Image (tube, helix red, strand yellow):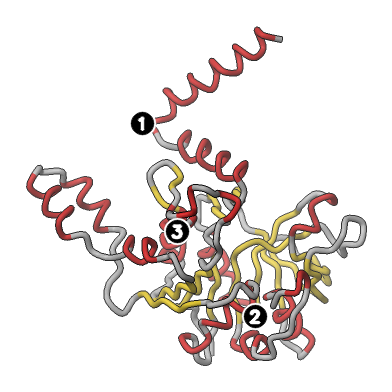
Amino acid sequence: MRRKVTKAIFPVAGLGTRFLPATKSVPKEIMTLVDRPLVQYAIDEARAAGIKEFIFVTSRGKSALEDYFDNAPQLEQELRRKGKDELLEILKSTNMDSGEIAYMRQHKPLGLGHAVWCARRFIANEPFAVILPDDVIAAEKPCLQQMVEAFEDTQSNMVAAMDVPDTATQSYGILDVKEDMGNIVSTKGMVEKPEPGSAPSNLAVIGRYILTPTVLQKLNKKQTGAGGEIQLTDAIDAAREEGEEVHGFRFRGQRFDCGSKAGFLQATVAFALARDELRDELWNYISDIVHAEKAAQ
């Protein structure tokens, strides 16, 4: 029987300290790329992949995130009164139906694996997706949709993966590749944040996963790994050691690390340049800066 992925976990409990002081009062996940919050890109990607239930693992101070997905009757009424139908439709697209979204608190920052474990009671005995909103992926076909289509054939644990330089391996979970089949690779292990020169490959795990209930069972042990945290990659690898397959999936698209300031700025420029109404003015501004710097040199 082919299992379908209809639930997704969004770990959004982090404090966003790299973006202080903005994140003192604004959750990082609703900081905007152009005019859409990071979390909206994640939700849209999940919907395109057929996700029906959205589970957010949050923490104290994230009420603005919850409010974002709620109805805004006064604002809708004002837009309707002024005949701003296009803006009204955009606003409605951010609403989530009752029962479609759930929130679970992570009371202590014990790692990504712990955040996923916090949502265990919403999952039951079925495969599920995990989406990290910090990783924004620009793709013609959304990344998670690509993975769900691949999962229909593999029916196994799957992680989104991309090649990274040798010097960057210590920032990622790295796949130990068993067989490289192009878009999909089978694995014989996973290593969390190996030092440069000691990594088994250059194929890094990024923030998209499709996982089986076995991974949740492994997380029940609450074993700590790199950094003294409960690592999701460790639980995935433990499932592999018990006979479950784990595949890496080379997605088609460009990933932006919006958990860093540089990545966030790069994504803002890229998404703005992709907008017809913004492209020319922004490109002219960038060109002027480049020409001025060259002239100064």
Disc 2 marks which residue?
156
Residue at horizontal 47%, vertical 77%? 105
Q: What's under tag 3, amino acid-wise?
A: Val
Of marks 2 and 1, the one in the foreground: 1
Nearest to N terminus: mark 2 or mark 3: 3
Mark 3: which secondary structure?
Answer: helix
Is the residue under label 3 in contact with that under label 1 (CB below 8 Å)? no
Nearest to N terminus: mark 2 or mark 1: 2
Q: Quadrant of the C terminus?
A: top right
At which x and y percent is residue 280?
Answer: 43, 24
Q: Is residue 12 above or below residue 157?
A: above
Instruction: Report the front residue among 176 and 289.
Output: 289
Horizontally, residue 226 falls left or right of residue 7, namely right
Mark 2: which secondary structure?
Answer: loop
Residue 46 placement: quadrant: bottom left
At which x and y percent is residue 283?
Answer: 49, 24
- Residue 255 appears in the rendering: no
**What is the CA distance from the residue labelled 1 to the residue labelled 3?**
23 Å
Residue 277: give its label: 1
Mark 1: which secondary structure?
Answer: helix
Return the residue found at the far right. Answer: 197
Crowd around label 2: few <14 · some 14–19 · many ≥20 (10 Å)? some
Residue at horizontal 15%, vertical 43%? 84
At which x and y percent is residue 180?
Answer: 79, 65
Disc 3 marks which residue?
39
Q: What's under tag 2, amino acid-wise?
A: Ser
